[in-house]
């Protein structure tokens, strides 16, 4: 996780809209480009999308 | 022999024409009238606009594909519809004006038994002073990614900005260029692809990137927002959209109607009535859509355009167009068969049909300026509707007027959408979303309007892989390569 960006917090300013939402933690950001996890998500998302496609035709 | 004429060769028209020809075979004739010589996979224009794809990667010539399929191809724009024929003939026809095939400017009458209107939108740049050039084309102050050529131009301008940002601070503005725009998703993709490219070029700190949109809340996307299951909650798309903007350091301005564009300046009015100016060094502002301006004439030559088309130029179909407040809108307002009420042999699909109303709640500023997204009808719904219409037309030809018409209501179909947030095999990301149904049904799904089991979304590298695979898959399908019918719309 050496390359994970820990600097999201600098974009948040108190009492501005950026303060009122959620932001991802470094772990969540890491998992977004973790090859093993994303390969699993690739399979899961494809199945979910196919279900929606099937339900729509 | 029946003659089916399809006006338009985009996602919906191409789908309708190719399936109609497949189902009708050589016994009947299918004619496509489109002013374009090339088919464009529009979702990938985003990547052309940031230099990650070339124009040739997202387009291919239509003529050889239609020749292979046995479809008659006329590179021309449709000008008028004559559903009752003319004085000396009862055969309905359309008039067209050629834009290619060596016949530029020539006009022709094309008779039809069944007509499918899939003309798509007119990119109405001139609706905002300065966004257009006054002649219906993109103006000099901003760029667009709506067509492949626009995207090439956008990338040329962007590369200059990225180069200049190495030594000076610059501002990028991306979003909607009018209070009544749709296609927020394309702008959403473009702004995050610019962010991604700026980071790769090492100039992100010198680039202020800002979002401007007609949405009343972040994550509306023209479909009134959506809810996703996450961490045991049904959470609003507002949270996820805002989260991504904060994460990437992109500021936002919403509820905005861009009223005028000048060199380096976008004037706007907000839903609260306040006005302001955003300065920019580079701006991509999506134009509003309108119908392409087709006219319609009765047998005696009188103008019946108002009977076939809504005031915005889109074709009236079997929707409930009764004006009523948002609170009284129902899923059943939306069309099911896309057949025009007066002429049973005319259908409209894709962006060409007139929606009964928006999906997002209509809002206006104290001055009365309408500021809210108009409904999207692109991508998967456009393909599904095009196929359903082709199916209906084929059944009408084969079984006669009593044939059952196929239905494809946007209030009963879902949509899968993959919005790129940066291209790269190992560092790319995209938001993979499904929504079911596209038009919320608050009677069937109280409160949220959608089925949470079939509405989901997440951002990550997997979404990028899916978007890239879809790029190749849909171009393969549109070229009618072996097995093309197995790929769903």
Image: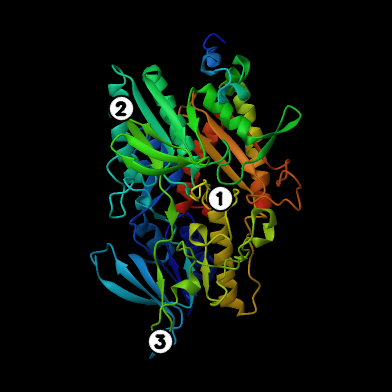
Badge 2 and badge 1 in a common chain: yes
Depth check, mark 3 against mark 1: the one in front is 3
- For numbered disc 3, what is the local secondary structure? loop
**Quarter of the rendering occupied by the N terminus of chain A:** top right
- How busy is the neighbourhood of tag 3: few (under 14 within 10 Å), some, or many (20 plus)? few
Residue B380 bears which disc, if any? 1
Task: Identify the image quadrant of residue B229.
Answer: top right
User: Which coloring applies here?
Assistant: rainbow
Residue B300 bears which disc, if any? 3
**Quarter of the rendering occupied by the C terminus of chain A:** bottom right
Badge 3 and badge 1 in a common chain: yes
- For numbered disc 1, what is the local secondary structure? helix
Q: CA gap, disc 2 to disc 3?
A: 57 Å
Which chain is home to disc 2?
A: B
Residue B161 bears which disc, if any? 2
User: Quick one: label 2 or label 1, which is nearer the N terminus?
Assistant: 2
Q: Residue at x 47, y 35 (%)?
A: B189
């Amino acid at each position: 996780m050496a390359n994970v960006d820990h600097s999201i917090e600098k974009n948040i300013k108190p009492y501005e809209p950026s303060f009122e939402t959620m932001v991802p933690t470094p772990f969540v950001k890491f998992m977004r480009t973790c090859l093993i996890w994303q390969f699993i998500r690739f399979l899961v998302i494809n199945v979910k999308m196919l279900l929606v496609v099937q339900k729509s035709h | 022999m029946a003659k089916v004429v399809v006006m338009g060769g985009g996602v919906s028209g191409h789908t309708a024409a190719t399936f109609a020809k497949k189902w009708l075979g050589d016994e009947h004739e299918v004619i496509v009238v489109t002013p374009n010589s090339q088919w464009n996979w529009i979702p990938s224009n985003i990547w052309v606009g940031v230099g990650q794809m070339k124009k040739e990667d997202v387009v291919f010539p239509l003529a050889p594909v239609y020749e292979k399929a046995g479809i008659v191809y006329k590179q021309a724009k449709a000008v008028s519809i004559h559903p009752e024929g003319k004085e000396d003939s009862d055969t309905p026809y359309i008039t067209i004006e050629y834009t290619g095939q060596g016949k530029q400017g020539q006009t022709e009458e094309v008779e039809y038994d069944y007509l499918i209107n899939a003309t798509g939108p007119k990119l109405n740049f001139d609706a905002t002073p300065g966004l257009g050039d006054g002649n219906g084309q993109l103006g000099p102050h901003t760029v667009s990614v709506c067509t492949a050529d626009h995207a090439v131009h956008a990338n040329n301008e962007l590369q200059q900005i990225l180069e200049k940002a190495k030594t000076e601070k610059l501002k990028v503005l991306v979003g909607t260029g009018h209070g009544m725009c749709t296609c927020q998703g394309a702008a959403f993709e473009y702004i995050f692809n610019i962010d991604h490219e700026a980071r790769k070029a090492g100039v992100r700190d010198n680039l202020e990137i800002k979002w401007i949109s007609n949405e009343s809340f972040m994550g509306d996307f023209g479909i009134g927002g959506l809810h996703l299951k996450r961490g045991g909650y049904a959470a609003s798309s507002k949270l996820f959209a805002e989260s991504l903007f904060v994460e990437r350091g992109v500021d936002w301005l919403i509820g905005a109607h861009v009223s005028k564009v000048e060199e380096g300046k976008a004037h706007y009015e907000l839903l609260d009535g306040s006005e302001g100016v955003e300065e920019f060094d580079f701006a991509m502002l999506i134009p509003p859509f309108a119908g392409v301006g087709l006219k319609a004439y009765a047998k005696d030559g009188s103008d019946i355009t108002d009977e076939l088309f809504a005031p915005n130029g889109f074709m009236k179909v079997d929707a409930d167009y009764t004006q009523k407040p948002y609170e009284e809108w129902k899923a059943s307002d939306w069309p099911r068969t896309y057949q025009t009420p007066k002429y049973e042999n005319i259908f409209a699909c894709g962006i060409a049909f007139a929606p009964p109303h928006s999906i997002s709640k209509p809002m206006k500023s104290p001055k009365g300026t309408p500021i809210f997204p108009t409904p999207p009808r692109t991508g998967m719904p456009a393909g599904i509707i095009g196929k359903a219409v082709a199916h209906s037309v084929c059944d009408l030809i084969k079984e006669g007027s009593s044939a059952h018409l196929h239905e494809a209501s946007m209030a009963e179909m879902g949509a899968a959408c993959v919005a790129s947030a940066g291209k790269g095999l190992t560092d790319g990301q995209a938001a993979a979303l499904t929504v079911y149904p596209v038009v919320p049904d608050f009677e069937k799904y109280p409160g949220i309007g959608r089925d949470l089991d079939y509405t989901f979304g997440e951002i990550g590298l997997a979404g990028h892989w899916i978007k890239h695979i879809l790029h190749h898959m849909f171009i393969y399908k549109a070229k009618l390569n072996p097995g093309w019918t197995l790929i769903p719309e």
